[in-house]
């Protein structure tokens, strides 16, 4: 079956521009997660959704980052006024529920390069 | 705060030899522990997980891991490595939050397999 998909796979943008990263979770998965993988910080948790709701935004690195999820399905991570330190691979994962008994299935990631 | 340490950044092993990847965690409660593998250009794939019960857990691709509470460790092992096991391996701890969960990852260990 279809797994988690992310688009674009690669994105190069100029410093100061806004970018949108998209995640299509596995159908029926109510939980959705965003992580960032960078050389300096390793793999770090950004935000999770239960349905369309994101109860805790404290993992987002700055107020330039925002995320939304609509229809309990697709999620977008938006970075405004991108900075070079935003360069990283952004990973999305989905799961049937929030409980750890259910595996988080990861997408292939979006590699963001800010020049 | 919880943390995960993978002391070895790189490990080189000969094909057919055994492999052990170290993971130490810091967490105030009974941990949910995971090992993920990331092959080049791929997303993260779950190898195995530990929640409770038998401290030796079996996973996919012939991997196993042993939870040792006294040492705060969850080391990953494979008796005989195949060339296809060359990848980066991440240990993770799951933290139950009030309304969800998140994974905290170690820095990863990159495994190179010599013919």
Image: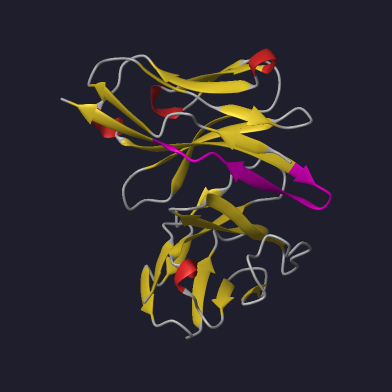
Residue at the location (79% across, 30% down)?
Answer: B29
The quarter of the picture where residue B108 lies is top left
Residue at the location (65% across, 70% down)?
Answer: A62
Q: Residue furthest right?
A: B98
Q: Is residue A72 above or below residue A28?
A: below
Q: Which secondary structure class fits the magenta region best?
A: strand
Residue B22 seen by the camera: yes
**B14 left or right of B64?**
left
Q: Position of residue B63 (x, y in %)?
A: 43, 23
Q: Position of residue B27 (x, y in %)?
A: 73, 32
Image quadrant occupied by the C terminus of chain A: bottom left
Residue range in magenta is: B96-109
**B98 left or right of A24?**
right
The quarter of the picture where residue A73 lies is bottom right
Residue B43 in magenta stretch: no
Residue A101 seen by the camera: no
Residue at the location (40% across, 22% down)?
Answer: B62
Q: Position of residue A55 (x, y in %)?
A: 79, 63
Q: Residue furthest left?
A: B115
Q: Is residue B90 above or below residue B82?
A: below
Q: Position of residue B56 (x, y in %)?
A: 57, 15
Q: Is residue A97 above or below residue A72?
A: above
């Amino acid at each position: 079956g279809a797994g988690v998909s992310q688009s674009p796979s690669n994105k190069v943008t100029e410093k100061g521009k806004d970018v949108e990263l998209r995640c299509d979770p596995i159908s029926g998965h109510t939980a959705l997660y965003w992580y960032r993988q960078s050389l300096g910080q390793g793999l770090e948790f950004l935000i999770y959704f239960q349905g369309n709701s994101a109860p805790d935004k404290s993992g987002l690195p700055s107020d330039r980052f925002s995320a939304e999820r609509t229809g309990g399905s697709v999620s977008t991570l938006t970075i405004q006024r991108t900075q070079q330190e935003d360069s990283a691979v952004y990973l999305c994962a989905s799961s049937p529920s929030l409980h750890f008994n259910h595996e988080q299935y990861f997408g292939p990631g979006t590699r963001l390069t800010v020049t | 705060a919880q943390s995960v340490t993978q002391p070895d950044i790189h490990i080189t092993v000969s094909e057919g030899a055994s492999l052990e990847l170290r993971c130490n965690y810091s967490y105030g409660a009974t941990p949910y522990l995971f090992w993920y593998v990331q092959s080049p250009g791929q997303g993260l794939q779950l190898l195995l997980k530990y929640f409770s019960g038998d401290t030796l857990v079996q996973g996919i691709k012939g991997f196993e891991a042993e939870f040792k509470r006294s040492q705060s460790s969850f080391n990953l092992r494979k008796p005989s490595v195949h060339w296809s096991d060359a990848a980066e391996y991440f240990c993770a701890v799951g933290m139950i939050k009030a309304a969800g969960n998140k994974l905290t990852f170690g820095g990863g260990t990159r495994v190179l397999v010599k013919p």
